[in-house]
Image (cartoon, coloured by chain):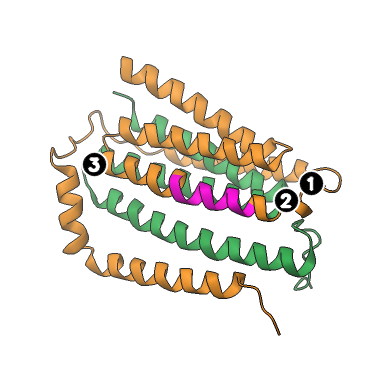
Amino acid sequence: MAQQALFLIMAVFTLGMALGTVTSRNIFHSALFLVGSFAGVAVIYFLLEAEFVGVAQIIIYIGAIATLIIFAIMLSRSVTGQNGSPMNRQWAFAALGAALLFAALAWLFSRVDFGSTAQPVPEDAIALIGAGLVTEYVIPFEVASILLLVALVGAILIARERHS
Amino acid sequence: MVPTHYYLILAAIIFSMGALGVLVRRNALIIFMCVEMMLNAVNLTLVALANQWGNLSGQVFVFIVMAVAAAEVAIGLAIVMAIVRHKDTINVEEINLLKW
């Protein structure tokens, strides 16, 4: 019962924050709403007994990605919000498209029958994930680390000032 | 116990909102944030299904997706910075050098 109440509260909170991100006129407010929606999703991860993913969400998304986005907003402050409406002219078609996308996803989910009971999550889930990352999923893990390294070197190369 | 369907519907709404933001906003940084929101919604779907089947592969996948999202943010913001320095605008309607 308490779980359902918490889910409802966090779902409404996350959706409100997501709506704020999409509709806010001030880009800095958008970024703060985005942090709120990340935090709401992190709480829902904890509700789903995925503690590892929840903590990773807080560290990576709120700690790193949101900070990086706010840095980018600060660095581009001179050119933001100088002219007119924050939306483009196709908003009606875009809203229709998003509504259709949601209707299709909802229809798809409503056709799946998961049965009555969920399988229990193993007690030592974090230990199993850790073991999985160095045994069964070692290749994706290593590829992800190389991808991150290459992406960071590339980001420095793209963003640096060129004096020529 | 909250049914798995509720989590999936919540993720679908967040994903649709992110798609709407990508389609309607003119500021490249906000389009960026909306892409992050869509990735987050997909992660939520993976975690909900991992919980449904009691299988941890979904959570490992989410971890890999987060690493890819971090790489994407680093590259994407670097490109935005380069465009700001080069063209003095962040409005995607004015960034049309490659537009046919």
Q: Residue at x 50, y 31 (%)?
A: A14
Residue underneath mark 3: B53
Q: Look at the image and tell me whether residue A133 can be seen.
A: yes
The dot on residue A81 is 1
CA gap between label 1 and label 2 equals 8 Å
Q: Name the chain under label 2.
A: A
Q: Amino acid at mark 2?
A: Arg
Say whether mark 3 and mark 2 are on the same chain. Answer: no
Q: Which residues are magenta?
A: A63-72
Q: Is residue A78 magenta?
A: no
Contact between labelled residues 2 and 1, with CB atoms less than 8 Å apart: no
Kindly identify the residue that appears in the image at 59 percent across and 44 percent down. B18
Sort mark 2 into few (<14), some (14-19) or many (20+) by Cα contacts within 10 Å.
some
Relative to B4, does residue A57 appear above or below in the rendering? below
Relative to the observer, which residue lies in front, A66 or B28?
A: A66
- Shade representing chain A: orange
Residue under label 2, please give it. Answer: A77
Residue B20 lies in quadrant: top right
